[in-house]
Image (spheres, coloured by chain):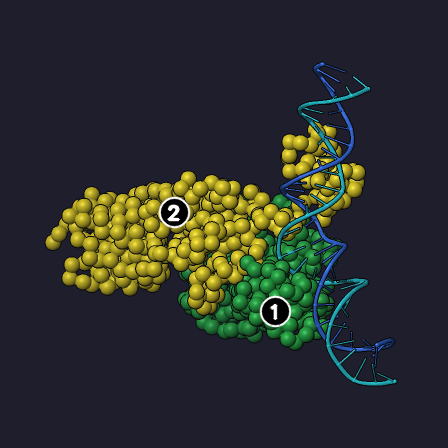
Chain colours: A green, B yellow, C blue, D cyan
Amino acid sequence: MATLKEISAELGLSVTTVSRALNGFPEVGQATRERVQETADRLGYRPNRIAQRLVTGRSGMVGMIVKIKPDMSADQTFFEILTGLTAALAAHDVDLVLAVDQGGDPVQPYRKLLERGILDGFILNAPVSDDPRVAYLRARNIPFVMHGQDRADPDYPVYGIDNHAVSSDAVRLLAQLGHKRIALINGDKGGAHAADRVQGFIAAATAHGLSADMVRSGATLERHGYTHALDLLAGEAPPTAFVCATTLVAAGVLKAAKDRGLRVPDDVSVVAHDDALPLMRAINFDPALTVTRAPLRDACAPLADMLVEHLGGTPARDLQNIINAELIVRGSTGPAPKED
Amino acid sequence: MATLKEISAELGLSVTTVSRALNGFPEVGQATRERVQETADRLGYRPNRIAQRLVTGRSGMVGMIVKIKPDMSADQTFFEILTGLTAALAAHDVDLVLAVDQGGDPVQPYRKLLERGILDGFILNAPVSDDPRVAYLRARNIPFVMHGQDRADPDYPVYGIDNHAVSSDAVRLLAQLGHKRIALINGDKGGAHAADRVQGFIAAATAHGLSADMVRSGATLERHGYTHALDLLAGEAPPTAFVCATTLVAAGVLKAAKDRGLRVPDDVSVVAHDDALPLMRAINFDPALTVTRAPLRDACAPLADMLVEHLGGTPARDLQNIINAELIVRGSTGPAPKED
DNA sequence: ACCGCAATTCAAAACGTTTTGAAAAACGAA
DNA sequence: TTCGTTTTTCAAAACGTTTTGAATTGCGGT
């Protein structure tokens, strides 16, 4: 815990010179710089971030808020990126402060953390339409990056997948296989990504001359996929193909098909979006799932890089990464069954 | 972002008085105190932790390190307590800084965070025998609390379950049911809790006149439970009962029993320890699992309380909570099968 | 020796808070 | 009033750093 003062005392220099020597300012002599550097190393000097922050206004710390349910549990997908992101930020020498959003006002945890006067910026995830957090942070000029797409052309740094394309790609594949009646079992309506997926679904269905009236929304739970699929399959014009929000939902759909005595892919085709979570691996399904694949983990390093860039002054418009998911065809999709 | 100076200017008071009024010092007049409080509220004043830390040496921030595997994934159990802990700390107005341990020197991430000069203490979890992190932090007098038991009588604050009792309770139950050959499929050898479980297992087995030679160790994976159970069941004196490290391991054991045509509990009994993770619920097993149950989540509030107490000066010896898991008997245990 | 200019170095202020030691105000008793 | 106490308030220092503006040094040219 050596301080600048200690180093300067040891060398008979002023604190100013020591500070400048260590920070690579040009006006310090080569000889002094080396002496200072050597003593700093020997004493194991590390600048005190607290003091640094107090004077520069920058702390090298950023915040992230995890939204939790009343039972304190959080979405699995959050943790999927949390560790990777922390590691990626650490590579930039940035630390991460975690806080929770216990429901209620979504802006409050951000405000609370900001009031500490301790953070340089935030990483947000799972945007909703017209996200109030975005409005709050933008109004105060607090830097942040968003994980997940909000609108087509957001005015803040963002890394996410093209959710419109996710659905339309899936629908196109199924249409090419001859399916006429395709259902979408989507994620929760509040999420911006869900809205984009619905739009992509409708756009692609319309483009292929299909109707798009079988759209369901809700939590991305196995149970949810199961009940919606059962319900849809019991209708008078049951779908021959399902597009699922996640592999977990697809698991429910497969179960529903099985319970109704339908074979996959002979009677029913299933496509899911795959975040590549370690628990529900699409390849281990029976049959292996056809998916649009975009590993959440891939977002970590880019998000960290973007935030650091943004803190360094790079404008938002240069930090927009909307990537496309891969369409990976496996055993859960096949030609539409012959009409009876 | 109101500061003390702003408040004092607004009221025509000195910064000193404002600071004291807000911190409840006795020497400030009742009338002034109320005026100050009112203005502080109106201006949304929050003390700047950075500045506070600089002068007091206390920041109201604590650190927690998550150990990740090379693929950046972390143990599920970590996240199970992370959010609850963050919320519990927030109730004490304490923020949490997260960092990762990417393998290698286990002490390094702690050192790095400490060198920032930013933290008041740490929360540790998953102790190993003679944990180097403990040695490091104790040597430097850095406050911390441990989640999980290390030794019988640690000299630091700890919250954990009695792992010795966990195994011995399970063995006692099985012995009372007449089982003579009991296997333990334990967690990874490195963990201190695993060592305690083995000791409890051996102690109870010995006490009941049973041998304790069927002990296996490894990662708490379903696959691991499956292969070890298959292996043990193929031996010449196969076990009639299994004690499992986790419900996930038990899932593997149940699968192995099924694959060998053995019925549970008629032919084989299974007991597992249940951390009450939301994903693998013991009650949803078929048959429902007999468990020693101790929800990880129960640790959050006590750990937060203990850390705050410890930071406040309460000595370690007054902060030791070793609780007992509940033994919950369900359908996966039954009388030992008749010897042929 | 003196000047001018560049190259170095320095003292002091600033960030927002807590704490120390002293000063001012209020009040009751003489 | 005048003194002594108690209550209330204040100015200044401190924490460790960066930054500003000024001072010092070195050196080549006259």
Residue B134's tag is none
Q: Please, what secondary structure does the residue beneath circle 2 have?
A: loop
Locate residue B56 relative to residue A288 in the image: left or right. Answer: right
For the residue pair B201 and A166, the one nearer the viewer reads as B201
For the residue pair A106 and B270, the one nearer the viewer reads as A106
Q: CA distance from mark 1 to mark 2?
A: 41 Å
For the residue pair B23 and A171, the one nearer the viewer reads as B23
Q: Is residue A227 above or below residue B305?
A: below
For the residue pair B80 and B94, the one nearer the viewer reads as B94
Q: Is residue C29 above or below residue A38?
A: above
Residue B189 x %, y %? 32, 60
- Amino acid type of disc 2? Asp
Parent chain of label 2? B
Residue D30 x %, y %? 88, 85
Q: Residue at x 67, y 31 (%)?
A: B27
Q: Please, what secondary structure does the residue beneath circle 1 have?
A: helix
Residue carrying label 1:
A36
Q: Tell me the quarter of the picture where residue A304 sits.
A: bottom right
Q: Residues within 10 Å of mark 2 (few under 14, many from 20)?
A: some
Q: Is residue B122 above or below residue B176?
A: below
> Which quadrant does the C terminus of chain B fall into?
bottom left
Residue carrying label 2:
B155
- Amino acid type of disc 1? Val
Q: Residue at x 33, y 57 (%)?
A: B187
Q: Tell me the quarter of the picture where residue A245 sits.
A: bottom right
Q: Residue at x 43, y 52 (%)?
A: B138
